[in-house]
Amino acid sequence: MRYFLQTIVAVGLTSGTCAQSTASVNDSTMLASIYSEVMLNAECYENLRYLCKNIGHRLAGSESAQRAIDWGKEVLEKSSPGHVLLMPVEVPHWTRGAYEFGGYNMQGANKEVALTALGGSVGTNDKKLTAEVIEVKNFEELKALGEEKVKGKIVFFNKPLDATLINTGAAYGGGYPIRGQGPSEAAKLGAVGCLIRSLTLADDNFPHTGATNYEKDVTRIPAAALSAVAARQLSQDLKSDPTLQFSMHLSCEAFDRTMQANVIAEIPGTEFPNEYITVGGHLDSWDIGEGAHDDGTGIVQSIEMIRTLQAIGYKPKRTIRAVLFINEEFGNDGGETYAKRCKEDGLVHVAAIESDGGGFTPVGFNCDLSDDQYAIAESWLPLLEPYNLFRFRRGGSGVDIRPLKDDRIALFGLNVDGQRYFDYHHTNNDRFENVNKRELELGAAAMTALVYLLDQTGIPATK
Ligand SMILES: [Zn+2]
């Protein structure tokens, strides 16, 4: 049996000098109103320009992340009716340092390669680390070589992402363990450094950073990613000279953990103020590029959701929050702290939505729902299809909101056409210029539309 909304909502439509009128509208009229407001008056693109160009990249723990927090608070204060809350979050503090270099000598010619330290890597102690390179595809090949062939060398994991996977997130997920665990697996066999082929589906010269996780009690060795082009070149050169000496110089440093904050704005619910719907993205980014698609877009879309609901005069039944999470990239401290605090404070979450797949054309939503919840979500598709939102795809929502998971909450992630996401992800090329205004706005409108539908139904609990 399909479930349709049969609600008559009171809505104040803004026009001209914000004259408020109350009208009975059905859901499709309401969605049309949301889309009109966003497509005609959105501020998300200009907000993204400011975030990317005036603040720039913003790794958690950095001064620029703090500037982003201050900016996020200020922008939300303009768009939301009440006080904007800063929720303290303890975050790591790591810096890449001013200098990073990789290269080798091949038949008398010096070749410098495009390389970037993995997030959290140790440095090379103010000097070049030089060693032979041993190339492997995966952990199995590494283990088969054994300590004898690995000791004293730089291990080079050279495995492209699986291009046959049309879901690029799944392709990325396949390469992810190498970035996370590769350095420690190499160190266990006596390696002195670790290189990985960047986790990308593009064939270009941008290296991709991202967190690596050293295992406890295993020697921490310097670790960096090579661009796809540099990885292919090194692999070819190793075939003609297996003893070539690779040099890397990283000036990374780790400092004490420090305090930053999640930024939270809300529109209080009029009927069920103790039921919450949280919408968010992560304010931190990696420390190269501008963190535009990852995840500046999710941030400005979440702010846009609040602005739009206010602009059309919508009075939600439930309390709607926009949350700018800090430190998704390097430990998910913002998401974990938020869930913990909500639990301590007894906040009941009906739903949460995250945008963290890039500001590309939305096609629907990923979702983590019970069967009953899924049936309700699917019943909304006739309302959403006019906006090119075609599916609720099971599996996945967002890293920041996942800690909220319980047997009550409905979790959603904005599902976009992500074919180009991993071209930009964690690179110096993740820049404002690579975000399309209309695609970004469509994402903001889609999230706002889903907020409206969730607010009206209060999607029932899993059990
Ligand atoms: Zn992200």
Image: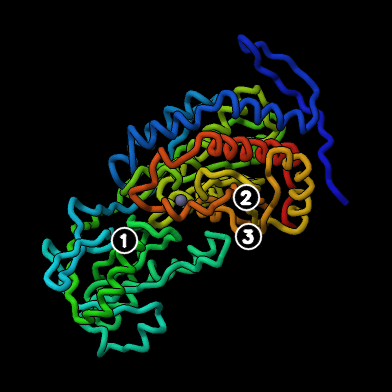
Task: Locate the C terminus by quadrant.
Answer: bottom right
Where is mark 3, residue-wise? 395
The nearer-to-camera label among 1 and 2 is: 1
Determine whether the beta carbon of the residue marked 1 sits less than 8 angstroms from the nearest atom of ligand 1: no
Residue 226 locus on image (x, y percent) = 31, 63
Q: Amino acid at mark 3?
A: Gly
Q: Nearer the viewer, residue 390 or 262?
A: 390
Q: Amino acid at mark 2?
A: Phe
Mark 1 or mark 3: whose residue is earlier in sequence:
1
Quadrant of res 144:
bottom left
Q: Residue at x 40, y 71 (%)?
A: 178
Tag on residue 118? 1
Q: Residue at x 58, y 61 (%)?
A: 166
Distance from Cα at disc 1 to Cα at disc 2: 29 Å
Q: Amino acid at mark 1?
A: Leu
Determine whether the beta carbon of the residue marked 2 sits less than 8 angstroms from the nearest atom of ligand 1: no
Q: Secondary structure at mark 3?
A: loop
Q: Residues within 10 Å of mark 1 (few under 14, many from 20)?
A: many
Where is mark 2, residue-wise? 412
Q: Residues within 10 Å of mark 2 (few under 14, many from 20)?
A: many
Please say if 224 is above or below 131.
Answer: above
Q: Secondary structure at mark 1?
A: loop
